[in-house]
Amino acid sequence: MLFFCSARAMAEDIRIFYSGQKVSRGTTTAKIGDRVTLYNESKTPCTFESVKPGFEFRAPTLKFKQSYTVVFFKRGVTTIACSENPKTKMTLIIRAETID
């Protein structure tokens, strides 16, 4: 019996936490199609965004314990920042999935 999995079924969940005016990872690598979830663990609201062409998104303002998930469908590098605190940012590297 053969089983086939689509790339979507093999997507991973990448979790990034914002707490105390900083993010849990300075640089993160994800594959195309992975779900990148941004969590606000701070009492300070945060609006995550990426403004790089082709990677643009702006999450709603997240209050304490709220989250937002984004999926990228092309490879490249972008910066995700908290618009309320521009020094709070991280680099996200999206790579194509490779078959070993």
Image (cartoon, rainbow, N blue to C red):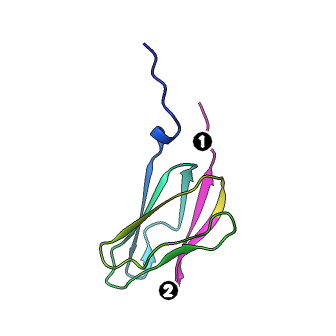
Q: Residue at x 48, y 87 (%)?
A: 84
Give whichever of 83, 99 is nearer the camera. Answer: 83
Dot 1 falls on a residue whose secondary structure is loop
Quarter in which the N terminus is drawn: top left
Residue 78 point in image, percent of width and height: 63, 66
Residue for badge 1: 97
Q: Residue at x 55, y 55 (%)?
A: 29
Distance of label 2 from label 1 (alpha carbons):
33 Å
**Magenta range:** 78-100
- Hey, which residue is sitting farthest top in the picture? 1
Q: Is residue 20 above or below residue 17?
A: below
Whether residue 89 is in magenta: the answer is: yes
Give whichever of 42, 67 is nearer the camera. Answer: 67
- Image position of 39 (left or right of 88): left
Q: Indicate the quadrant where residue 37 lies.
A: bottom left
Residue for badge 2: 85
Dominant secondary structure of the residues highlighted in magenta in the image: strand
Q: Residue at x 54, y 49 (%)?
A: 33
Residue 44 point in image, percent of width and height: 36, 85
Disc 2 to disc 1: CB gap under 8 Å: no
Whether residue 98 is in magenta: the answer is: yes
Q: Indicate the quadrant where residue 52 lies.
A: bottom right
Give whichever of 27, 82 is nearer the camera. Answer: 82
Q: Amino acid at mark 2?
A: Asn
Q: Amino acid at mark 1?
A: Glu
Residue 76 point in image, percent of width and height: 67, 57
Task: Answer few, some or many: residues within 10 Å of disc 2's Cα (few below 14, many 20 plus, some between 14 and 19).
Answer: some
The mark tally for this picture is 2
Q: Residue at x 63, y 64 (%)?
A: 55
Task: Answer few, some or many: residues within 10 Å of disc 1's Cα (few below 14, many 20 plus, some between 14 and 19).
Answer: some
Instruction: Give whichever of discs 2 and 1 has the lower sequence position.
Output: 2
